Amino acid sequence: MPDYVIVGAGSAGCVLAARLSEDPSVEVLLIEAGGSDRHPNVKIPAAFQKQFKSRRDWDLATEPEPHCAGRSLYVPRGKGLGGSSSMNAMLYVRGHPLDYEKWAASGAEGWDWDGMRPYFLRAEDNARGDSEHHATGGPLRVEDERSPRRLTGDFLESCVTVGIPRSPDYNGTEQDGAALVQVTQRKGRRWSTADAYLRPAGKRRNLTVISGAQVLGLEIANGRATGVSYRRRGRKHVAAAGRDVILSAGAIGSPQLLMLSGIGPAEQLSDLGISAVQDLPGVGENLQDHPYQTSVWDVPGGGSLADAERPKAVLEYLLRRSGPLSSSVAEAFAFVRSKPGLAQPDLQFHFAPAYFVNNGFEEYDGHAITMGPALVSPRSRGWVRLRSADPSDKPRIQTNSLAEPEDVAALVAGARLAREIAAAEPFGSRLGRELLPGPDVATDQDLADDLRARVELLYHPVGTCRMGSDEDAVVDPELRVRGVDGLRVADASAFPLIPSGNTNAPTIAVAERAADVIAGKPLLREDTTGGTAAGE
Ligand SMILES: Cc1cc2nc3c(=O)[nH]c(=O)nc-3n(C[C@H](O)[C@H](O)[C@H](O)COP(=O)(O)OP(=O)(O)OC[C@H]3O[C@@H](n4cnc5c(N)ncnc54)[C@H](O)[C@@H]3O)c2cc1C
């Protein structure tokens, strides 16, 4: 019998499987619903969007959002080895140190910046080399984009013209400023957690991976999780766990599995005919994601990623793994503050030398650039709930994005700043007409209405199995589900608050730390002299 059964081979699950199986005396079973990650749309960076609504996508969506003109927002989630790290845009962002101070202050004791930083570094193999802020030798390869477009350089210069400083490293001393992105790629190919962690550990005799197997629920006896049931090729199986079942099914999948197993808000569950094993009202609550707005300009002189699939670009990628196909589409960021007096940036501009509108589903006959300011600390909170007791039914999701006037105001300020950047040199003389929101959208009210009509999510759902020390928290700071023995949740759902940036690197760091917590190892912690020490 395996000691640990891990559900979900995504960003977190692959890390946990690899780290826990480093101890040869421990048996690990990793179960994943999806299949192989060998498709070119997984490996070729610029093709990530082609996975949307394919069999590698859970293809979820929110219920009509009350503050987004009643629209349902698309929620893609990776399905297959690597999970969402095999589908994401590969942007390597840790967030702001203050984010993790807030985690600890909210009750996630030990998960402050000094507790998290050593795990970001343990994971990392940064092509820029060892430095105060970066490490080499870890499993997760982080590189600079190989062929940023000239338009991306123009964006950075135009930011400087409007007073946004160039930042050498948004994961370094200061998050503020405009910078080229770093990406989880190796030599121009995606480097998911399946590449970084699972494949190197794959030959271990104490690690078994079962793919194409959807977990249906937990086996629970006398208040203890004893295993999981799963369906593979139409047949139902049970896998027993000697020590722990670890849910790493992501911010939608993990609360869904808890609720299907009777762990969650008892009243809601009983309405669906599920008898509660443990009444935990917090399960599925506290959903957070980053809303973002797109501002788009035509580029008469060309030079965007619209040429990425031309034969010359394909050849360049095949021969040298460079050129537009090695692009993560978003090639630069600007972290800015929408108003004075904020302790940290509240907007993260994603700059794409491409027309990227409506999740990339809309096409444009020409060249364009997109600036997408995302709100990094949204105030609104949403939820994930079951649609029915059937595990194959997609859950109900609501983010409540734009419920809070301050969130709307910050994004409206972002749209205005996008226009300033577009008007500043060198963009001023290179960009053509404003395509979106369009020159007629002029007043703050117009911009707010446009925002509600077009806002999208940045694919960063977190927080639905919140870690904390209070009674409403779903897991404690050791990631144990309250009231059920032998059960942990370790993935983006355990985040108490959404970090101020993209969520893959934070999920990997959480899983790295979770592996030490679960194995009972001494936890790494930054010491006061800036070094890293093992301690408690
Ligand atoms: C399109 C897209 C673009 C993104 N871009 C970026 C980016 O550029 N940078 C960044 O930092 N972040 C990005 N993200 C977010 C980031 O990838 C996620 O936050 C992170 O991968 C979450 O990790 P996780 O382990 O919590 O979940 P996941 O990686 O989603 O893993 C969950 C795994 O569990 C499996 N699973 C779920 N339910 C079951 C079940 N019942 N039975 C068996 N298996 C199950 C899933 O198939 C999946 O493999 C993006 C996400 C998406 C979808």
Image (cartoon, rainbow, N blue to C red):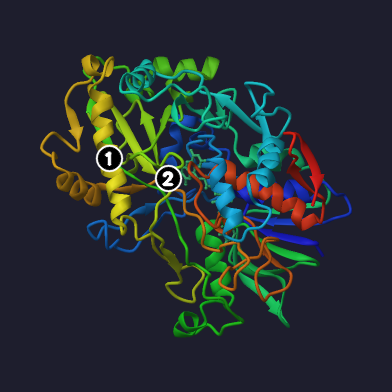
Residue where numbered disc 1 is placed: 413
Can I make out residue 81 in this image? no
Q: Position of residue 426 (x, y in %)?
A: 28, 14
Q: Is residue 134 above or below residue 55?
A: above
Q: Position of residue 102 (x, y in %)?
A: 55, 52
Q: Farthest front residue?
A: 341
Question: Label 2: few (<14), some or many (≥20) within 10 Å?
Answer: many
Amino acid type shown at disc 2: Val
Q: Residue at x 52, y 35 (%)?
A: 90
Is 280 on the left or on the right of 456, as rendered? right
Q: Position of residue 253 (x, y in %)?
A: 53, 61
Residue where numbered disc 2 is placed: 376
Q: Residue at x 49, y 85 (%)?
A: 270
Front one among 476 and 123: 476
Is 534 on the left or on the right of 174, as rendered? right
Q: Residue at x 41, y 14 (%)?
A: 312
Q: Is residue 150 above or below residue 85?
A: above
